[in-house]
Image (spheres, rainbow, N blue to C red):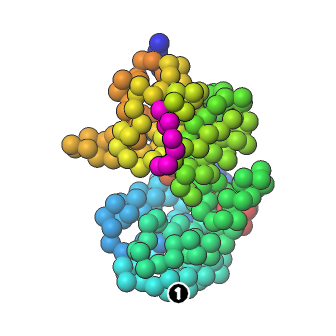
Amino acid sequence: MTSKILDGKKLAGESEEQIRQRVQALKAKSGGATPILATILVGDDPSSATYVKMKGNACARVGMDSLKVEMPSHTTTAQLLAKIHELNANPNVHGILLQHPVPSQIDERQCFDAIAADKDVDGVTCLGFGRMAMGEAAYGSATPAGIMRLLKAFQIPLEGKHAVVLGRSAILGKPMAMMLLNANCTVTICHSRTQNLSSLVKQADIVVGAVGKPEFIKAEWIKDGAVVVDAGYHTVNGKGVGDIELAPLLHRVAAYTPVPGGVGPMTINTLILQTLEAGEQKLG
């Protein structure tokens, strides 16, 4: 079997060119105004700083602006909320990204939910999740929304398929399951307390790995001809690996996302696309 590679890096590159053209058109229409993404980084975690930098670079590549907000690691919930409210009230800011995770003394959920719905371009609020789950207009959580765009672009059939999502986080596993359900999949959500995990995964036509543990999901659990989506990324012995043991699957599944180069680029691209859409709503 020749497995189809779900090349997120290539798709994101093609999408960036389309976004760039839309940004130019918006600038011409609005007298030079451009969508602006505000990124909030609390603390000095190097991985989080890298992710925020990548998102700022992506904005620059398509001609959008970013507003970089950095706050110290001892920031309180009240101080972070005040900053979010300030950005909500700023008419020149069209999208707000609060980089996850924040330091432990901060109530992250309260701060996520303080982001205005029309600026929640990362899809992290309870309101946004609820609207998305009900099939109403909302900005989807960036990683699962990026996965859905990837599956659509490569014409992966979803209707009637059994999708197994491994992971139940608020910004990945749960919204992923709801998006697949809305696409008429039959969805099973597995997690750390799921019994007979391997037998459930073996039933899956579509497997989404979002457990946050390197190669936790074994190749032998996955049936031939399945579609494999790996939303994890870890560095092990200097090499990037995902949540799924991918190497033995490369010639016996229908399609798979490479690690790196699969889901990751689509996450950032979806964030930028949704910021553009928010900007178009206000400036266009």
Q: Nearer the viewer, residue 221 or 230?
A: 221
- Residue 112: within the magenta? no
Q: Nearer the viewer, residue 81 or 67?
A: 81
Residue 123 image-quadrant placement: bottom right
Number of numbered callouts drawn: 1
The residue that appears at 60% across and 55% down in the rendered structure is: 141
The residue that appears at 26% across and 44% down in the rendered structure is: 236
The residue that appears at 44% across and 66% down in the rendered structure is: 101
* Residue 278 visible, this angle: yes
Q: Which residues are magenta?
A: 192-198
Circle 1 residues within 10 Å: few <14, some 14–19, many ≥20: few
The x, y position of residue 249, in whole percent, is 41, 24
- Residue 197: within the magenta? yes
Quarter in which the C terminus is drawn: bottom right
The x, y position of residue 78, in whole percent, is 52, 87
The x, y position of residue 46, in whole percent, is 31, 64
Residue 137 image-quadrant placement: bottom right
In the displayed structure image, the side of residue 212 where residue 229 appears, left or right: right
Q: Main secondary structure of the magenta part?
A: loop
Q: Is residue 80 above or below residue 5?
A: below
In the displayed structure image, the side of residue 176 where residue 264 appears, left or right: left
Label 1 residue SS:
helix
In the image, farthest residue toward the left = 237
The residue that appears at 41% across and 25% down in the rendered structure is: 220
Residue 54 image-quadrant placement: bottom left
| Kind of residue indicated by mark 1 | Ala
- Which residue is label 1 attached to? 78
The x, y position of residue 103, in whole percent, is 40, 74
